[in-house]
């Protein structure tokens, strides 16, 4: 009986929108084969196991033919011979089963090993790509690359490859055995081959379309649910429940219809295929039966033919079924290879300068830098800023003025278009990126927490940092009291969004990170923006202790956060327009003074764009 259609790959729908050239296909396969090459011996063993398993299976009808023609129909009562044939038949079943088991295990192991390696290398590659790459690619599509695309490649090895060798070999074996048994009858049977294949291919292409449609509708439904869950507060606040439910019902119904169509076409195909099988058997019984009557073939030969013609269908069906998987594999492979071929545009210098971390002072020089996220739209214009070691700099300015960009440039997430940035007199392009990132501690508005315990989140899974050091750091920033209040204390498990912790508590944990890793330069990008005034005070006092002895750059919308800074830089349209202490800037009665008055709720807002 033909197998049920078991497509489960959502990327099939992607493949329908994705055209790849024969050259791309060849390149993708070449790349995939490079991953398979180290497993040559295993593939050879798989091939051998498949060969033996198929041979054992297909010899069984031949044995029955011997029992019928050489024993039963000639009236020989050779029970010993019959017993031996039965014994061999059983032995062949056991051999077939054992080799199939072995082949399957080997293949799954090999496929999974290849995919584990691809997944690992892909993840490593992604972690090395520059921020400009992540600006362009949505994380959703990257998740698809890492999960479904690699899974499709796994299916290539465990399903397509298996089908090619197993079903291909089975077909060849059957044809050879048929011609060996009776060339005339085999010739008639071959007439059936293109008919079966033609029908299977036509059906498969139709089924694949219905499958793609139902996958597309399912992903639309899922996307709709995800969007609604994310914006549930807005839906409720704007009384959109009814409208959204209406839209959901519509999408739900469309998916239901597509699903029904897919199931119907599957059942229709499987049943038609069954009928075709029966017609073929009837055809062989008719032609072969006449030959038996005419004594041109023996009865056992007819029996073997009927069995083989039934077995003809499965491999053809399987091969056509795998054709779709093969197409999605090429698409996935091509997509992955495009991703792999993106080279990070920010690289370490060929001969980077060695930096003695203990001797870092934290002097920063922005020397007439110019920068834009694209060539034609500069965001920072000829900015010149020199910061002394240990100085605390407050950076203020309206939305889009370029404050965060200035910090990203210091971390070398992006490259300046002209000018240079120096730390202790060394151009950051000459410092290995890993060292540079160890020199700088970054605390953002929404500190990122990893899945793991509080201890691991503070020391970032670096077990060289002791638990005691982590606790000490938390005490230092004033986080100890709140952590010990938690049920599991320092072992409390956090998730990406820091479940169970308030924004201020998460911020304190990121301060403790700074204490533990001791970077000489500290950047706080709107770190207190999300906090209520009481928590802000807690974080402010943590900031005071953490910034001690470090060059600290604080970006803040709330001017209260930076009033105590040694120097305040006021930015507008990518330029520094004023600088000085809070008092000096107020005395100037310029842009800062306007911002300050506005933040105090007096005067007109000075927060125009940029
Ligand atoms: N990843 C990016 N890709 C393209 N343009 C960007 C990107 N990030 C920022 N910009 C643009 O660069 C300009 C400066 O942005 P930046 O985030 O540095 O300003 P900001 O002063 O920090 O603003 P805010 O106070 O709102 O955070 C803005 O016009 C912004 O739209």
Image: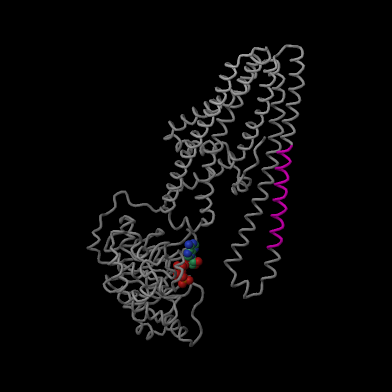
Q: Nearer the viewer, residue 510 or 66?
A: 66
Q: Nearer the viewer, residue 126 or 255?
A: 255
Residue drawn at x 40%, y 82% as measured from the top left: 560
Residue drawn at x 50%, y 33% as measured from the top left: 103
* Placement of 111 over or under 462, stated as above or below: above
Q: Does residue 377 show up?
A: no
**Hey, which quadrant is residue 489 in on the image?**
bottom left
Q: Is residue 517 left or right of residue 341?
A: left
Residue 525 screen position, x and y as percent: 41, 70
- The quarter of the picture where the N terminus appears is top right
Q: Is residue 317 left or right of residue 387?
A: right
- Numbered disc total: 0
As for residue 138 lying within the magenta part, the answer is: no
Q: Nearer the viewer, residue 274 or 468?
A: 274
Residue that lies at the very extreme toward the bottom in this rendered image: 602
Report the span colored magenta: 248-271
Residue 17 screen position, x and y as percent: 63, 47
């Amino acid at each position: 009986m033909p197998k049920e259609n078991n497509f489960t790959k959502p990327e099939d729908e992607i493949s329908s929108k994705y055209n790849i050239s024969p050259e791309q296909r060849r390149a993708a396969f070449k790349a995939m084969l490079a991953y398979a090459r180290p497993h040559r011996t295993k593939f050879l063993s798989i091939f051998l196991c498949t060969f033996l398993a198929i041979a054992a299976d297909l010899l069984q009808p031949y044995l029955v033919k011997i029992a019928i023609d050489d024993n039963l129909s000639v009236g020989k009562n050779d029970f010993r011979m019959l017993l031996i044939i039965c014994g061999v038949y059983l032995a062949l079943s056991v051999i077939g089963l054992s080799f199939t088991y072995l082949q399957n295990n080997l293949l799954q192991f090999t496929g999974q090993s290849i995919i584990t390696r691809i997944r690992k290398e892909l993840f490593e590659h992604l972690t090395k790509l520059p921020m400009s790459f992540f600006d362009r690619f949505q994380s959703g599509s990257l998740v698809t690359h890492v999960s479904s695309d690699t899974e499709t490649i796994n299916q290539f090895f465990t399903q397509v490859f298996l089908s090619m060798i197993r079903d291909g070999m089975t077909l060849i074996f059957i044809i050879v055995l048929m011609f060996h048994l009776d060339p005339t009858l085999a010739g008639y049977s071959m007439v059936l081959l293109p008919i079966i294949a033609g029908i299977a291919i036509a059906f498969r292409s139709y089924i694949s379309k219905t499958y793609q449609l139902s996958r597309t509708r399912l992903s639309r439904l899922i996307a709709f649910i995800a969007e609604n869950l994310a914006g549930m507060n807005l839906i409720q606040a704007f009384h959109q429940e009814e409208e959204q439910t209406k839209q959901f019902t519509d999408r739900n119904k469309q998916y239901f219809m597509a699903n029904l169509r897919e199931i119907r076409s599957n059942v229709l195909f499987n049943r038609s295929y069954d009928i075709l099988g029966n017609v073929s058997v009837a055809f062989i019984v008719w032609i072969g039966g006449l030959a038996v009557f005419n004594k041109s073939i023996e009865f056992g030969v007819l029996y073997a033919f009927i069995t083989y013609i039934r077995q003809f269908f499965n491999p053809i069906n399987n091969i056509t079924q795998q054709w779709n998987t093969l197409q999605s594999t090429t698409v996935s492979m091509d997509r992955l290879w495009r991703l792999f071929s993106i080279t990070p545009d920010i690289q370490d210098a060929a001969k980077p300068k060695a930096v003695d971390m203990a001797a870092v002072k934290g002097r920063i020089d922005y020397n007439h830098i110019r920068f834009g996220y694209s060539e034609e739209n500069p965001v920072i214009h000829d900015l010149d800023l020199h910061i002394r070691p240990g100085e605390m700099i407050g950076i203020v300015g309206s939305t889009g003025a370029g404050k965060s960009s200035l910090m990203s440039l210091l971390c070398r997430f992006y490259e300046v278009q002209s000018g240079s940035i120096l730390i202790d007199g060394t151009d950051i392009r000459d410092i290995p990126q890993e060292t540079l990132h160890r020199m700088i501690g970054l605390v953002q508005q929404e500190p990122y927490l990893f899945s793991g315990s509080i201890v691991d989140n503070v020391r970032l899974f670096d077990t060289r940092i002791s638990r005691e050091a982590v606790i000490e750091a938390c005490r230092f920033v004033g986080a100890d009291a709140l952590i010990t209040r938690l049920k599991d204390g320092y072992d409390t498990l956090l998730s990406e969004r820091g479940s169970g912790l308030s924004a201020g508590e998460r911020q304190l944990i990121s301060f403790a990170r700074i204490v533990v890793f001791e970077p000489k330069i500290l950047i706080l990008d709107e770190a207190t923006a999300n906090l209520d005034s009481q928590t802000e005070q807690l974080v402010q006092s943590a900031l005071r202790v953490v910034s001690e002895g470090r060059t600290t750059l604080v970006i803040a919308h709330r001017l209260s956060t930076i009033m105590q800074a040694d120097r305040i830089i006021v930015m507008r349209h990518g330029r520094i327009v004023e600088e000085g202490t809070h008092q000096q800037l107020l005395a100037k009665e310029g842009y800062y003074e306007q911002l300050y008055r506005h933040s105090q709720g007096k005067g007109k807002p000075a927060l125009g764009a940029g």
